[in-house]
Image (tube, grey):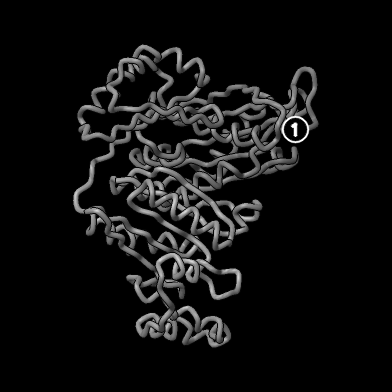
Amino acid sequence: MQAQIITIGDELLIGQVVDTNSAFMAEQLNSYGIELNEIVSVHDNAEQIISALEDALGRVDVVLLTGGLGPTNDDITKLTLCRFFSTRLVENEEVKKHISELYAYRPEVFNRLTATQWQVPENALILPNSVGSAPLMVWTIEKDGRKQWVCSMPGVPYEMEIAMREQILPYLSRQMGAQAHIVHRTVIVYGIPESKLALQIADWEKALPKSMHLAYLPKDGIVRLRLSAYSGVTDEEVEAQIQKLLPLLGDSVLATQDLPLEVLVGAELKRRRQTISTAESCTGGKLAVLLNRHAGSSEFYKGSVVAYANEVKENVLGVREQTLSEYGAVSEQTVREMAQGVKQLLQTDYAIATSGIAGPSGGTEQKPVGTVWIAVATPQKTEAQCFHFGKLRDKNTDRATLAALVKLLKILQSE
């Protein structure tokens, strides 16, 4: 079963809004065994919407549209779909009741434009939108023994996500019955460039069955190797290939689950009932953001000191003035003392410290832009490592944050 996503809105095509909806829908479709064929973005233009819809229905079974369902003049999706499906708008009492209840305590929002939301295409199946006013609309097309579905949802991300989870996917699942099982397995690799990695596992990749496909997904020093199987391949068959791959990668493997590094770190610390703190200079709090972004992080993460200025390193973290004057803020000696200082200050089992020259200025011949020192203090020792990332400030801080998590995870895994 194949699907296509059509996102509607001028704001997507001028770069004003980033399309996060498609990524979410792709992931959800995959979990239901529906293969995503293509993602298309079009303007708030009736001809473009109809053209994209006709093209999609010529190739896929399910078309998912998002956007253009608001009450203002630029929201034309509902009228365009009426034109496409040769129908008209009619009042829907259930939608009217829902909207009245939704805005009962917000009379300033309810007006003649809001009232147009309970007008829906006469020949569409209307599914409830529990958190918004725009109705969810579904059409079933039957022709020559084949069924296709067109589903229209709001473009507001949280409304779309709830609509997909609560209504659209359960509905499609009931209509389509059992689908082919899609299997994905991911191996996370660090420290090997993508091209070198491809050469290293070339023989294994060439020997893969035709029913399996390998994708390389590189980002900031990490490569995610995703092995996918679509045509009735079992989990066990995919797992057998993964077991052949792992010995070829050695200690460069970080994980065999497609999870964020901070989740892997958190899971290991929670399993041990241990805690961590962070002392950040060049990363400016990015480690703290990652470590506390997931529910349950309070079990292992105590807090952070963003010590950008030397006086903060000295007065809060206890870095010695002699260390700073003799070796500088970006040095092995300084990050060691930063890690040990925050570990003692916040009374944690582990601590991470970062200090570097993010750029674009500030570098020297001895310490060029992109030089970053990272230290991890453990219950037994403190380890430090120097990295050279490049000249782009944002990339340097992102890579330093990632490298710090990788270093900690490797230490945890080796203990």
Residue at the spot x=66%, y=32% of the render?
Answer: 355
The C terminus lies in quadrant:
top left
Q: Give the residue pinned by disc 1.
A: 359
Instruction: Name the residue at 48% across, 36% down.
Output: 350
Mark 1 falls on what kind of element? loop
Q: Residue furthest front?
A: 144
Question: Could you say where residue 351 lies in the image, as x and y percent from the top left?
Answer: 52, 36
Residue at horizontal 30 percent and vertical 20 percent from the top: 208
**Within the image, what quadrant is residue 169 found in?**
bottom left
Instruction: State the residue in front, 56 or 137.
Output: 56
Q: Is residue 109 above or below residue 263?
A: below
Q: In the rendered structure, which amino acid carries the disc numbered 1?
A: Gly
Q: Is any atom of residue 296 visible in this view?
A: no
How crowded is the residue under tag 1: few (<14 C-alpha within 10 Å), some, or many (20+)?
some
Q: Nearer the viewer, residue 146 or 243?
A: 146
Q: Quadrant of residue 142?
A: bottom left
Relative to residue 189, is residue 390 drawn left or right?
right
How many numbered discs, if any? 1
Q: Is residue 13 above or below residue 376?
A: below
Query: Residue 78 location, x and y as percent?
Result: 47, 70
Where is residue 88 drawn, in percent x and y? 43, 77
Asked if one can make out residue 28 in the rendered structure from this viewpoint, the answer is yes
Please name the residue shown 44% across and 25% down the image: 189
Residue 225, image x and y in percent?
Answer: 41, 27
Q: Quadrant of residue 121?
A: bottom left
